Image: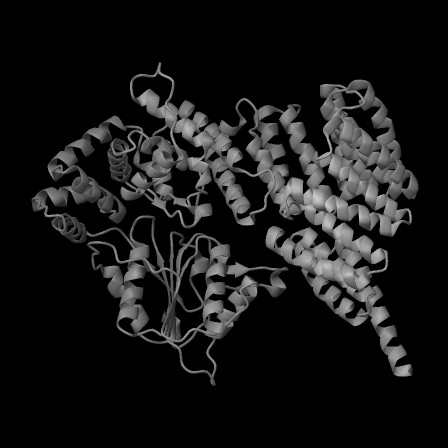
């Protein structure tokens, strides 16, 4: 049931300790309270650390505490996804929206906010905190024609408040007014320091506080950190200023231009002093290397497994041993608990935000703190830490991505690392994480994005390593693969033909990478329509692999698998089944019964037996295989899900259309949960479900489902993708069948 008013959605930040009333707060209330829709959408903009979030929180608390609101929604808007998620939660709580469809729930909430004459008046405030990009507030699901805005609608009783570091023109207009948030004034800085210290029984001379505020550039975040240092250390402001001045001279490389938005050196120095303090707290000498590592990742959220995993802990241990002035000692291991405690120390000193309840974004670091931290590293340290950070990401990356949110966070962190690492991830070779993130994009269903990623990587490796470096050639191979997966099989084959010529020239005809290129080229030529040519190419490749690698090498066995597949695609289903039976025996002998390649051979054998006419036997074999896949790989592994789809198909072919439809409906729910609604496998599942519902007698329902699917396939894959074209054909076929069904019924 929809929640009763007044109601609050999201976690509203607490008021800052020693919060200072500022001129910006008066301007905010004046512009909001002035009346009229033209001034009810406010955008607080300014550099990081000036206190925009606290101003927004103070405004929201005041409006809520005084009874001026019926609904308050606070959303952390650092990307489009959390905005949609926050709106969806509001839609669930306030509108009774379906929690299984977050995008529709979000749109329902936005529609609910729109004024309606028959609805009871609702006084609402929506706060979008930390908008990183104005484009995140516009969703383009399938092109400009159907895009929609995430800005709350104009309403005489509604208010919208946005905080952001951006100053783009897109943030103005449409009744929005910018409120610039600057630094503290001198009086505000002194008042803040005085109040903050007095809360802990401390009193300092006014002239010292005035000088400290000036030397810290009047930045609220820097003043808060300096205040925490003074409280924790017990030192006087005069002593702190001496340390500050001394550090400024030793950090001569920190010139004012090194930081964005005309940030003064004093800010970075204040962070450095806070870090010195953090490094002395238990567990000692772990805070600094932890922050140095975190400075290389995504400021908006680092999965906790990355800075607390084995690779990161080895880095912490090595740093602690070196800092102990006993580097000859074997580094004492750092436990996961100590790594977490190091994060908590940094959190206490306001150097990071550590929120373990959100494990995929557990660590957030202000981008200016990251910048200041990175700038203290020598070039060699920067490259070394970049490689450690990349290793930490690889160690945290699961072989099978069952958690789509984790995979998305790992990709975001890889992108942030690649941006700040510069050449560091290309020395001496391109780091494997650059390839892993592209494959992750593709396996998540974003084949086009994966192709763009590998195009950029191929350009980068060419620039850093040269056009003939193996890493450049590997990037080109991945580019061709995902180009094909995105629907351009002919283009993939053409690119692989060019790559093959280069690999023969650089590596030689018998190099494993050259042989792999031949296999990929044959595959994509087959997918482009030349199945007989693909089978012939694989047959020729097989003889070379046996000669170079041996009959039992995994690559040789894989080529036999591909040869059997294209033999079947070329029309010889019985021959393909026989070839898979022989391959299965060899894979059991070489790899064992539970090896994934052995299980894959069983799947291929069952498929082609079905295509050869034994649908019931195929279904029986797949049922046995499915039990083994669940045992070996788990219920959510992609191979397990694929086997369930194949089993449903052959049950349908064997005569049980209704059972096939029921099984595919259950599989669809699991695919949405594991892979997401827009993954190509999920979309294919929807098509198969519609097909078997039609075969079970519901032709009209099949046509309706295929029509809905077509819109999603066009949006996700594009108008010209082979799957889109196939879906159009199926839709037309079932629309005809549904029409014939209607005519027959009326005739009867």
Q: Residue at x 67, y 35 (%)?
A: 478
The answer to whether residue 258 is seen in the rendering is no
Taking the view exactly as shown, the residue that stands out farthest to the top is 328
What kind of colouring is applied to the model shown?
one colour
The quarter of the picture where the C terminus appears is bottom right
Q: Residue at x 78, y 56 (%)?
A: 725
Q: Choose top left, top right, bottom left or bottom right for residue 246.
A: top left
Q: For this view, does 421 lie left or right of residue 19?
A: right
Q: Measured from the top left, where is residue 730 in percent x and y?
A: 81, 61
Foreground of the two, 606 or 28: 606
Q: For this view, does 164 lie left or right of residue 706?
A: left
Q: Choose top left, top right, bottom left or bottom right for residue 130.
A: bottom left
Q: Measured from the top left, where is residue 656 in percent x and y?
A: 82, 60
Foreground of the two, 149 or 710: 710
In the figure, 241 relative to 739: above or below? Answer: above
The answer to whether residue 235 is seen in the rendering is yes
Q: Residue at x 80, y 29 (%)?
A: 586
Q: Measured from the top left, where is residue 297 in percent x and y?
A: 44, 39
Foreground of the two, 493 or 747: 747
In the figure, 607 relative to 595: above or below? Answer: below
Foreground of the two, 401 or 656: 656
**Number of labelled discs?**
0
In the figure, 700 relative to 383: above or below? Answer: below
In the figure, 67 relative to 517: above or below? Answer: below
Q: Measured from the top left, where is residue 650 in percent x and y?
A: 82, 53
């Amino acid at each position: 049931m929809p929640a009763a008013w007044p109601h609050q959605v999201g976690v509203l930040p607490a008021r800052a300790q020693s919060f200072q009333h500022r001129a910006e707060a008066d301007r905010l209330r004046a512009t909001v309270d002035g009346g009229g829709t033209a001034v009810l959408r406010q955008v607080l903009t300014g550099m990081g650390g000036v206190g925009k979030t606290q101003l927004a929180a103070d405004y929201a608390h005041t409006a809520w505490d005084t009874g001026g609101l019926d609904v308050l929604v606070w959303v952390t808007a650092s990307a489009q996804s959390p905005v949609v998620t926050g709106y969806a939660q509001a839609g669930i709580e306030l509108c009774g929206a379906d929690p299984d469809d977050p995008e529709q729930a979000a749109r329902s909430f936005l529609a609910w906010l729109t004024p309606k004459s028959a609805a009871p008046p609702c006084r609402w405030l929506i706060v979008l905190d930390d908008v990183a990009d104005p484009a995140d507030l516009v969703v383009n699901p399938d092109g400009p024609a159907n895009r929609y805005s995430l800005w709350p609608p104009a309403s005489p009783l509604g208010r919208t408040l946005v905080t952001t570091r951006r100053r783009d023109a897109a943030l103005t207009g449409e009744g929005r007014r910018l409120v610039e948030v600057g630094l503290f004034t001198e009086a505000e800085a002194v008042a803040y320091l005085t109040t903050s210290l007095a809360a802990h029984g401390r009193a300092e001379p006014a002239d010292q506080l005035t000088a400290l505020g000036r030397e810290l550039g009047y930045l609220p975040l820097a003043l808060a950190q300096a205040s925490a240092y003074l409280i924790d250390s017990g030192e006087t402001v005069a002593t702190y200023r001496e340390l500050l001045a001394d550090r400024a001279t030793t950090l001569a490389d920190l010139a004012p231009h090194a930081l964005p938005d005309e940030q003064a050196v004093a800010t970075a120095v204040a962070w450095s002093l806070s870090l010195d303090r953090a490094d002395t707290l238990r567990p000692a000498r772990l805070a600094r290397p932890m922050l140095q590592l975190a400075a290389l990742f995504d400021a908006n959220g680092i999965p906790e497994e990355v800075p607390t995993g084995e690779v990161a802990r080895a880095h912490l241990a090595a740093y602690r041993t070196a800092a102990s002035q006993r580097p000859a000692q074997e580094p004492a291991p750092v436990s996961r608990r100590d790594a977490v405690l190091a994060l908590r120390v940094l959190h206490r000193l306001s150097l990071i935000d550590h929120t373990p309840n959100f494990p995929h974004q557990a660590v957030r670091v202000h981008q200016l703190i990251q910048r200041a931290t990175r700038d203290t590293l020598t070039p060699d340290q920067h490259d070394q830490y970049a490689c450690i950070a990349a290793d930490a990401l690889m160690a945290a990356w699961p072989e099978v991505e069952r958690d789509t949110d984790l995979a998305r966070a790992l990709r975001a962190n890889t992108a942030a690392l690649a941006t700040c690492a510069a050449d560091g991830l290309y020395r001496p070779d391109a780091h494997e994480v650059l390839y892993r993130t592209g494959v992750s994009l593709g396996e998540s269903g974003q084949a086009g994005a994966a192709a763009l990623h590998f195009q950029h990587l191929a350009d980068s490796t060419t620039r850093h390593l040269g056009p003939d470096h193996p890493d450049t050639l590997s990037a080109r191979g991945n580019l061709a693969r995902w180009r094909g997966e995105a629907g351009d099989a002919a283009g993939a084959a053409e690119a692989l033909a060019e790559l093959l010529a280069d690999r023969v020239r650089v590596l030689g005809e018998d190099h494993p990478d050259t042989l792999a290129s031949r296999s990929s080229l044959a595959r994509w030529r087959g997918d482009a329509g030349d199945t007989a040519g693909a089978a012939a190419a694989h047959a020729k490749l097989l003889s070379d692999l046996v000669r170079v690698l041996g009959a039992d090498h995994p690559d040789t066995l894989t080529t036999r698998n591909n040869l059997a597949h294209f033999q079947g695609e070329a029309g010889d289903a019985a021959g393909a089944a026989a070839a898979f039976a022989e391959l299965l025996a060899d894979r059991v002998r070489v790899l064992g019964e539970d090896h994934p390649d052995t299980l894959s051979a069983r799947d291929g054998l069952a498929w082609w037996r079905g295509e050869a006419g034994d649908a019931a036997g195929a279904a029986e074999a797949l049922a046995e295989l499915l039990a083994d896949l669940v045992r070996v790989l788990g219920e959510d592994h992609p191979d397990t899900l694929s086997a369930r789809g194949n089993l449903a198909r052959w049950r349908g072919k064997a005569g049980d259309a209704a059972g096939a439809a029921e099984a595919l409906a259950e599989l669809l729910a699991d695919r949405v949960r594991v892979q997401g609604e827009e993954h190509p496998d999920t979309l294919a599942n929807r098509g198969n479900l519609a097909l078997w519902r039609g075969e079970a007698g519901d032709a009209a329902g099949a046509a309706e489902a295929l029509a809905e699917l077509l819109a999603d396939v066009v949006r996700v894959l594009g108008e010209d993708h082979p799957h889109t074209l196939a879906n159009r054909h199926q839709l037309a076929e079932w629309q005809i069948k549904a029409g014939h069904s209607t005519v027959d019924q009326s005739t009867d």
